[in-house]
């Protein structure tokens, strides 16, 4: 199934995405809010791109009007639960495109993609407590707040972060779809 809305498409990463990836991932306003160090060089972006190309459920967010990659979204097993059927989503967007609803759409596409796999029972998302933009993306996608885990993450800087944690079960997702 194609993962797209009127203005964005999620697709697997490709080697030709290096320039676009480096352009937004080097910005110190982007990575640290998602827990990762800004890319220090094009070589670092290239290594990370190589990993993402071979990682299942790691997608480039493409703006259809320009066909440029403006963000990243990925999902993997939620290692904070002892349940292999629980996935967690991470994402980041080029700062030039913030607050236009793009990541809300991308997360919506990713949720449908993950629940298309009958092996997914629950999807989790977290954000650092001060990350208001991320909080809204999660809320607008219908996730339920579970609580705050204090000192959940130690950053590459050594700083320790509290995280607000959310989840969406398959039943909640299916009930929402049935009533819309
Ligand atoms: C968080 C992020 C993915 C949001 O993407 P986005 O496409 O800008 O999100 P959307 O436009 O879909 O929604 C953003 C919402 O947050 C709100 N928002 C943004 N900054 C805010 C702030 N400082 N205080 C309160 N609300 C804020 C916007 O008003 C909007 O909500 P609304 O639709 O109710 O008005 C993007 O800002 C980003 O990549 N940040 C850096 C990396 C990161 O934080 N990744 C997520 C890690 S969990």
Image (cartoon, rainbow, N blue to C red):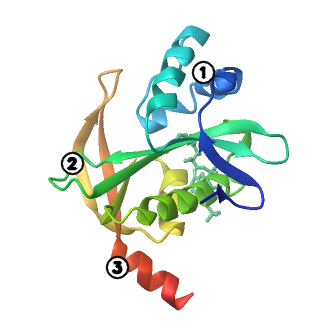
Task: Locate residue 61: give its quadrant.
Answer: top right
Report x, y in % for residue 174. 43, 80
Counting from the top left corner in percent of width and height, residue 90 is at 44, 45
Disc 2, ligand 1: is the CB inside 8 Å?
no
Task: In the rendered view, tell whether residue 115 sits above or below residue 13.
Answer: below
Mark drawn on residue 26: 1
| Residue behind mark 2 | 80
Classify 42 as above or below 117: above
User: In the rendering, at what x and y percent does residue 13 appear?
Assistant: 59, 33
Mark nearer the N terminus (2 vs 1): 1
In front of the other: label 3 or label 1?
Answer: 3
* Circle 2 or circle 1, nearest the eye: 2
| Mark sitting earlier along the chain (3/2) | 2
Q: Nearer the viewer, residue 40 or 53?
A: 53
Going from N to C along the chain, the mark reached first, 3 or 1, is 1
User: How far apart in space, not on screen, are marks 3 and 2 (Cα)?
Assistant: 21 Å
Question: Dot 1, how many residues are within 10 Å of its Cα: few (below 14), some (14-19), or many (20+)?
Answer: some
Q: Quadrant of residue 6?
A: bottom right
- Specify whether 150 is left or right of 129: left
Quadrant location, the C terminus: bottom right
Q: Residue at x 55, y 18 (%)?
A: 45
Q: CA distance from mark 3 to mark 1?
A: 39 Å
Q: Secondary structure at mark 1?
A: loop
Q: Please report the residue visible at 72 percent of the width from the left and 55 percent of the height from the top.
A: 100
Nearer the viewer's eye, disc 3 or disc 2? 3
Q: Is residue 32 left or right of residue 46?
A: left
Q: Residue at x 72, y 52 (%)?
A: 8
- Crowding at mark 3 (Cα within 10 Å: few <14, some 14-19, many 20+): few
In the figure, is residue 71 to the left or right of 132?
A: right
Q: Which residue is mark 3?
A: 171
């Amino acid at each position: 199934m194609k993962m797209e809305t009127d203005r964005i498409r999620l697709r697997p990463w490709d080697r030709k995405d290096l320039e676009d990836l480096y352009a937004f991932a080097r910005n110190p306003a982007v990575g640290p809010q998602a827990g990762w160090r800004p890319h220090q060089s094009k070589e670092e972006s290239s290594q990370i791109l190589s990993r993402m190309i071979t990682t299942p459920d790691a997608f480039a967010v493409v703006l259809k009007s320009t066909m440029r990659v403006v963000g990243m979204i990925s999902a993997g097993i939620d290692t904070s639960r002892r349940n292999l059927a629980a996935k967690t989503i991470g994402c980041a967007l080029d700062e030039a495109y913030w607050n236009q609803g793009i990541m809300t759409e991308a997360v919506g596409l990713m949720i449908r993609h993950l629940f298309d796999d009958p092996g997914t029972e629950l999807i989790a998302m977290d954000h650092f407590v001060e990350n208001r933009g991320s909080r809204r993306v999660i809320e607008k996608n219908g996730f339920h707040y579970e609580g705050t885990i204090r000192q959940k993450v130690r950053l590459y800087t050594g700083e320790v972060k509290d995280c607000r944690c959310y989840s969406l079960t398959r039943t909640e997702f299916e009930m929402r779809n049935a009533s819309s």
